[in-house]
Image (cartoon, grey):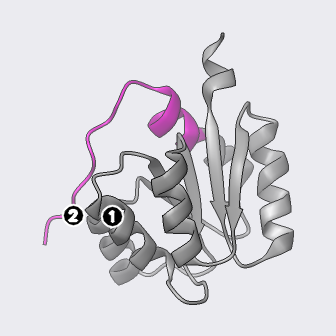
């Protein structure tokens, strides 16, 4: 079995259109989409239960936002690579997401070239230590 067939992903976003767009983009890059969720609570539970290679979370969602979902996942020592997507990223949000354990932050609308770069850097390359943000 080749490496690509072992790649799995979960998409957590409250927009069905964005989930569909990201599903196609990830499947075209060799990922098996093993779950989709519309809020951070369901997404965090799914990540912890299914342990995908990659999870892509929206920042702004109902019930729990992406930051709260990441904190819940990392509190259980889950090593899934987590990318966060958001239409608006400011310095404070960026620092809090990285400190919580996000591996990459991408802006909406998603640039497929940047998504590919992040997948190569954090998923396909040898393990990279989690980044921390100095205060």
Query: Can residue 58 be spotted in the picture?
Result: no
Give residue 23's position: percent from left, percent from top: 79, 52
Which quadrant of the figure contains the N terminus? Answer: top right
Give residue 39's position: percent from left, percent from top: 61, 78
In-image side of 134 versus 46 (left or right): left
Give residue 104's position: percent from left, percent from top: 46, 55
Magenta residues span 117-135
Residue underneath mark 1: 98
Q: Is residue 113 magenta?
A: no
Number of other residues with Cα within 10 Å of mark 1, as a class: few under 14, some 14 to 19, many 20 or more = some
Q: Are marks 2 and 1 in contact (CB under 8 Å)?
A: yes
Number of other residues with Cα within 10 Å of mark 2, as a class: few under 14, some 14 to 19, many 20 or more = few
Q: Quadrant of residue 60?
A: bottom right
Q: Is residue 32 above or below residue 132?
A: above
Q: Residue at x 41, y 53 (%)?
A: 103
Which quadrant of the figure contains the C terminus? Answer: bottom left
Q: Residue furthest bottom?
A: 63
Q: Is residue 71 above or below residue 29?
A: below
Q: Residue furthest front?
A: 49
In the rendered structure, find residue 81 and report the number of the disc placed on it.
Answer: none
Give residue 59's position: percent from left, percent from top: 54, 77
Task: Please tell me which of labels 2 and 1 falls first in the chain.
Answer: 1
**Which element carries disc 1, helix, strand or loop?**
helix
Residue underneath mark 2: 133
**Which element carries disc 2, helix, strand or loop?**
loop
Q: Residue at x 49, y 66 (%)?
A: 44
**In front of the other: 54 or 95:** 54
In-image side of 62 versus 91 (left or right): right
């Amino acid at each position: 079995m080749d490496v690509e067939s072992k790649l799995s992903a979960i998409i957590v976003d409250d927009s069905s259109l964005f989930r569909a767009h990201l599903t196609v983009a990830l499947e075209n890059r060799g990922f098996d989409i093993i779950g989709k969720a519309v809020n951070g609570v369901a997404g965090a539970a799914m990540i912890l239960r299914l342990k995908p290679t990659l999870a892509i979370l929206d920042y702004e969602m109902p019930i729990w936002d992406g930051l709260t979902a990441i904190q819940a996942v990392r509190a259980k020592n889950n090593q899934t690579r987590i990318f966060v997507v958001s239409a608006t990223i400011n310095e404070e949000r960026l620092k809090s997401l990285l400190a919580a354990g996000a591996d990459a932050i991408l802006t909406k609308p998603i640039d497929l070239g940047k998504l590919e770069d992040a997948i190569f850097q954090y998923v396909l390359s040898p393990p990279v230590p989690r980044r921390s943000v100095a205060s």
